Amino acid sequence: MNKNYRILDLIRRNRSPHENHLIDGLVDGRVSRRDFIRHGSLLGVSLPLLGRITAVAGFGGLPSLARAQGTPGATIRVACIAPTATIDPVTTSDFTGFVLLQQAGEYLCVGGPDLVLQPVLAESWKSNDLGTVWTFKLRKGVKFHSGGEMKADDVAASIDRLADPASSSNALSVFKGILQKGATRKVDDYTVEFHLDTPNGNFPYMLSSDNYNAIILPASYKGDYEKSFDGTGPFKLEKYTPKVGASFVRNENYWGLMALPERTEFTFFNDEQSQILALQGGQVDMMNAVSPLAGIVLLNDPNFNIISAKTSAHNQFHMRCDSDAFKDPRVRRAIALCLDRDKLVAGLHKGRASLGNDSPFAPIYPSTDASVPQRKQDIAQAKQLMEAAGAGKGFKVTLTTERYIDIPEYAQLIQNWVKEIGIDLDLNLLDQGRYYGDAVFGKSNWLDSVMGITDYAHRGVPNVLLAAPLKSDGTWNAAHFKNRDYDALVSSYIAALDLEAQKASAGKIQNLLLEETPVIFGYFSDLLVPTAKGVTGVQPTAMGQLFLDKASKA
Amino acid sequence: MVFLGGQVLPGNVGRAILGPFADQRAVDTLNHTLGVDRPLLTQYATWVWNFVQGDMGTSYIFRSPVAPFVIDALGNSIKLAAVAFVLVVPIGILSGVVAALNLNRPLDRIISLGGLSVAVLPEFVTGIILVLIFGVWLRWLPISAAWPRDSGFFTQLYYLILPSLPLFLVLFGYIARMARSGMIEALDSDYTRTAVLKGLPWRTVIWRHVLRNALLPTITVIATQTGYLIGGLVVIETLFRYQGIGSLIVTAARGKDFPMLESGTLTIGIVYAVATLSVDFLYSVLNPRIRLGSDQ
Amino acid sequence: MSAVQTTSPAPDDTRERGPLAEVLFSLLRSRTFLVGLAIVLFWIPCALFGEHFVPYDPLADDIINALAPPSTEHWFGTDQIGRDVFSRVIVGSRDILTVAPLATLLATVTGTALGLLTGYFRGIVDDVVSRILEAFMAVPGVILALLAIVALGTSTATVVVLIGLSFAPIIARTVRSAVLTERQLDYVAAAELRHERALYTMFVEILPNVIPPILVETTVRLGYAIFAVATLSFLGFGIQPPSPDWGLSISSNYGMISGGFWWTVLFDALAIASLVIGVNLVADGVHGALND
Amino acid sequence: MTNSAKAENALELHDLSVAYRVAGRNRAVLRNLSLNIGQGEAYGLVGESGCGKSTVALTVVRYLPRNGSITGGAISLDGKDVMKLDAEALRRARAESVSMVYQDPGKALNPSIRVGLQLTEIFELGGITGQAATDRAIAMLNRVRISDPLSVMQRYPHQLSGGMQQRVAIAMALANDPSMLILDEPTTGLDATVEAEVLDLIVQLRQELSTSILFISHNLAVVSNMCDRVGVLYAGMLVEEGPTDVVFNDPRHPYTVALLRCLPSGGKRKGQGRLDTIPGFLPGIGADIKGCAFADRCALADERCRTELPLLYDLSDERGKRLSRCHYHDKAQALPRATPSDVAPAPKPAAAPVLRVAGLNKTYASHGHPLRAVKDVSLDLWPGETLGLVGESGSGKTTFARLLLGLVPPDDGGTIELEGKALAPKLENRGDDQVKAMQIVFQNPDSALNRSHSIRHILGRALKRLAGLSGKALETRLEDLVRSVRLTERHLAVKPRQLSGGLKQRVAIARAFAGDPRIVVCDEPTSALDVSVQAAILNLLVDLQSKEDVSYIFISHDLGVVCYLSDKIAVLYLGRIMELGPSEDVFSGPHHPYTEALLSAVPKLDQTEKARIRLDGEIPSAANPPSGCVFHTRCPRKIGSICEEQVPPLAEAQPGHTIRCHIPYAELARLQSSTPPQEVPSSQLIACQNGFG
């Protein structure tokens, strides 16, 4: 590998210490090329520059987001699950909701494939040395569909609205303890500063497509989003009919490259099966996503392509650490050892998933310490642990979970596996509303059950996953896991701006969680986006957003 | 009753909208905005007051008026039910009549046993078997009722054939059996004997004397089946992913969307009442004993 | 003979046979009943001992070998997590054959008691109870069930209670109308003229005479209970995984139907069909035998 | 059988056999039946239920039940072989030559078609349509004495009364001027006065038309009045045939002889001796009969009777052609009595009445209007006495009985005293002794006996509750009780449905007597029974009465039966007592005009009386009773506006005999001994002694 140190030095000259540290890591081989790009983008190093750095460091060029130009003028028809509630950037929480938000609206930056943050409405960003103040430079000349130019006021209002506890913001949990209402400040018309409560090395992710509520709206936004879908994106709303669908047309005044398709149509379906049928029947060109179980139908069909993206989406299989059955970590480990993760990935997900290692650190995260050994099925050891914990005879316990995508099958597989170590698992499958209940302790099957499986969507950074479900005061701590060491490790991980520091904390966290195993992370599923043959240029994010501006039909 | 149901439904509206991972403060705020943190009785009173004035209220979940949703869903349900009904009433009655006229012959046995069998099968079972035959193997009919947007009448009809078939079969069984037993009773009656012994041609006996009396009970059955039909629609709508009133109610119940739930259920109640009343009316028109009362 | 025929059967000279023997005799002569009985008698041992003679453990997964089409190894193929469909179909009769009869039993006991009370006392008791029951019956059953289950959550006990209670008014109505007829009969007056207590009259005098309609209604309801349990399971509200229950299996595999994985649902559907039809044929036979 | 020229006979049955297929086996109902009905002749077919009468009718028109089939023989209608007709010819035969009227006209008319259309469609068959058909229909309705045919034609059948319905049915049957009219129990189920009207109508129509009639009835008296010739059917076989008066006056088959002896006719009373009975049962349908079908029940039968089927012996003489299927037809009238004729001893005189009823009222609510089912009834009943309650349906007989028993609470005000002690209006408030002192024998034993319980349970329970017995004592008493109603130990184990109607009624009687009652209400206890069984039950009641010194309240629409059993009669009309007195006085008269009409309506076996007092109109509704004398709307002896305006008092005509009429007693006596109203010829004093059907 040829390393052109001279050019690297040139590049380093204008970089912050963190950035330079990252570059050093790359050069020293501590940081892989992929991690470098991902982490570098986070720190605000522009992509072309990163490309240059990696090229200079001998890794070859960055894969371009914009692929080969297709034929313009197509109408791309997408099947989605009907949104479960009103589309409103402030409150929307469902998958289709944020896919629709992002058709007309845009974020300051987006998490592209492989978690690389790409600037969109922001041209660049950087933090102070502590990671407590982040400054975003905005793109100039961006116009809302309603006509006005997007300026710092709009950004500040949009983000402030999300951080306002009085606004029913769905993003409140993201900003909680990090960004308060009023902490977003306009510096000038094209510069915005964010003053954080605590240092946060991953803050830009919170303003990216990963925080799907964070689309930039005019400062004057008053609700009624469904009427206009006002935003800055490459498409603007043609028509939205609740429960039926939405259509968008090309925004001819778009600030960037004009979108290829003339129109996009989103048709709502009640479930995946109908979407698949519509796709098979040629009524739509693609689905916004498909679950591996339902998508099996399409996986082997030559008439369809499946775009797949690695994500950190997963199901958390928690065991309450304060319950009699699971207070002994050996029992929890024993259960974790029963899982045949290879089978889960190969069988349940037909290979479209990655192994989980009982911590939120998915392989996709740059900070994940890959050197931590992967946990494998080991019944013999599991039995020993059970004996050691005095539970050699096994016991009976109820696994409460939700009826959602592959969870029932996952639960049944677990049920079969733990039988081997004498655990008799009763399944209690609830519909989602019932499982989550009020989502507060004492009023939620999710948070109160002795053992449960909960679906978690993709996160661009593991921060939330590390904190809410596992920290002693975590609001989603269904495992009731209380461990000071862990809390401390997570705090230091979050505060770390430096990838290596993050990785070091990550490794410790991973090992601690392997030892304690309050939550079993069996696998991380891929995002699967099926399209009809001939549809090209569709770009999903790991989060599930769908960029159609480069899409075309053969 | 639905009001009581609404009280015990789990979860809360704000939570249903914002999802489990939203911050509690946001949920509380939203609940307050929607007014769902008021006592249920107040909510109910408000809703009833508005409903009486023709306003079905505003959906908590969709934050837009309920009426279009309910009307749409009802329209869809009625389309589906209408297809089944239009097919089943004449065919069911005809089969029952034919069976009765061929009592205890093979044709009768086929119709009665066939009718019994299809009538007692859960809709989703007949539905699945039909889907497999016509949708998966023969590929004649679409296996989902969701027709492409802006479909014309015939396309919609085409999409509705398969979903309406299970309903058809269940109703067919009931109606054919009722028509058959009504026919048998009428054929065995003294007045039929009188008519035959008058020397009336067979055709006149059947058309003038037997049919009208025989089909009166069948009409009642058809009425009582509207209740069933609405129940059956839930399953069919689930099976064929059809946006009808049944799925509307189920969704509303899950989302604790109180105005939607109330309006949907009440709409069903109204449809049921209207159907029952109109059949009562029809029945009394056809049956002089009810129409004219008794002089004695 | 003219085409017209009448049913009025000639008086039957069966004085010597007891009523029970007569019913049995006519049941055994009814082909529908025997066919129905054969079907039901096929499933009962399957439910009781099925797991001992099926080729595979109906719960054992083989995820790598999932969704295999029918073969000599797996007669009915395998499902989404590789379980043997044949074994599941056979053993799948167990839960439905537990839940449905229990629900029917509950419905019969409650319904009979209510029907006896309302039919016997008439007057206010009847008016009040009957109005309530009518209101109950006016709400479409599935919707009622869904609301209740969404509210109460799913468990086998809930399903039993729910179906039992929603069928009870129907049985009560049947019993009530039978009791009202019996109430008119003079033996009830004769009992009053002996100063019998109401409970005695209801349970010793009237009840035995309304057993035939109860029996018919119960068998018919059993058919509907199976119908209802299967439907609830299909909607995801009934029997819970990992039970190989038919409705549940269909529910979890129906999504695969467009992929041509028909074996994951067809056999379960046929199994439900056979059991429901079987029970109803029995009901039809019982009805015929008791009403001749 | 003679084989006369075909045209001579409207109907010929030749060797006809019909079977019903039951439980996979063909069971014979009619066995080699042959009979001829001449043109214009009225032929009566009589027999007990189950002997195949109706099957004959249905066979003639080829309308047998699905499981019935003709297994042999031939039917010739107007010379045409009915069995050989194809569907169209059969239809024409039905349209042109044969008509049928049957029981229950309410069912025979189509409920959803106006009467007019049901009539005119018959004319339309013959090509007469439009106004012509309407005219014909009007004429036809006029002919059956319907006064307002146009309005009747606009009505639906349910808007007509039972009598009117049957007239319409008769009009329909006669519309095509058939050569053969089959009447299958046309008046059964109608009230006596209505029955009389319908029968009168048929007699008159016979005179006007030339139709031949096959008249089927279980009622010997009706047949004797209507028919020229009569055939007696037993177990599907013709056992005797001949001119009506000859057969009934000089029967030559033991069955006919016995049947006639069973009837409480000729005004016979219990004090004059028991009724005769016929032991045993009618053979079931399809029974294997080797010899004479009646042999098992015949005291004359010998070995020959049991093995050799008797021929139809031709006994024609100067009185007409007659046949009897008996080897010993010459000795038939020497048939020994099955029941000795000894008289039960008269009751001992008592000092005080056992039951006093004063001012008893019962008002029901009917569609918001009060309906006075029983109004102001007062009477006494003495120990060992039988009070007969008579009246048409709706007269309040049964309600009155239920009031006494406490099954229905009376209105406030009236009193019921049992042995001097007032009875609570409601049954549950009466003492156990009071309850057991008054029991009832219901009309229909199928309804009265719990079909799920064995006879032992039914009687045992009654003994336990009413007599307070248990254990050994109960067993002993049970045996006594069973014996006293002439049942045997064997009957105890079975359930009611395994017993015949007569035996069931015995069980019901035994139950009523379980607690040594003072009063037994008998509510039409024999109306569901055949005459031969009725006689046995009546005898039993008489025996029990004299043995137990019990009082009866005996309700019956059959005046002959009431007359036989009662010491005192109360005549009820619209819930009011019209006449009350010793039965001899009430029957012999002078009596209330209503009583007069009732008695007149009873068909008499001996054909002594032809003309009747006809009552006009329908029984008024009790919800809206006529003003003044409630009977004035139908009274043939109405004297003027006083009848419409003033309620007549219940005046004592003779000691113990009260009549509610404005006509003074003497005047009544004069009227009724001279000219009966309307066309009734003179000198027909209707008296108990003169005989009732």
Image (cartoon, coloured by chain):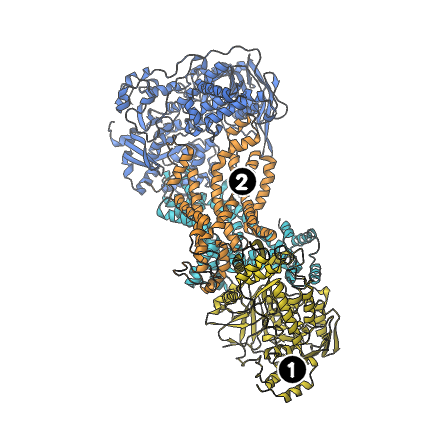
The percent position of residue D293, horizontal first and vertical second, equals: 31, 25
The percent position of residue D509, horizontal first and vertical second, equals: 48, 22
Q: How crowded is the residue under tag 2: few (<14 C-alpha within 10 Å), some, or many (20+)?
A: some
Q: Secondary structure at mark 1?
A: helix
Position of D314 with respect to C230 (left or right) is: left
Looking at the rendered image, the quarter that the N terminus of chain D falls into is: top left
From where the camera sits, is residue D429 visible? yes
For the residue marked with disc 1, what is the amino acid?
A: Asp
Q: Which residue matches tag 1?
A: A24
For the residue marked with disc 2, what is the amino acid?
A: Val
Q: CB atoms at circles 2 and 1 under 8 Å apart?
A: no
Question: Who is closer to the viewer here, B206 or A549?
Answer: A549
From where the camera sits, is residue A88 visible? no
Of circles 2 and 1, which is in front? 1
Residue D188: image tag: none
- Chain letter corresponding to the colour orange: C
Residue C109: image tag: 2
- Chain letter corresponding to the colour blue: D
Q: Colour of chain B?
A: cyan
Position of A165 with respect to D690 (left or right) is: right
The correct choice, above or below, for D681 with respect to B105 in the image is above
The percent position of residue D500, horizontal first and vertical second, equals: 41, 26
Position of D285 with respect to D525 (left or right) is: left
Q: Secondary structure at mark 2?
A: helix
Q: How crowded is the residue under tag 1: few (<14 C-alpha within 10 Å), some, or many (20+)?
A: some
Position of A382 with respect to B129 (left or right) is: right
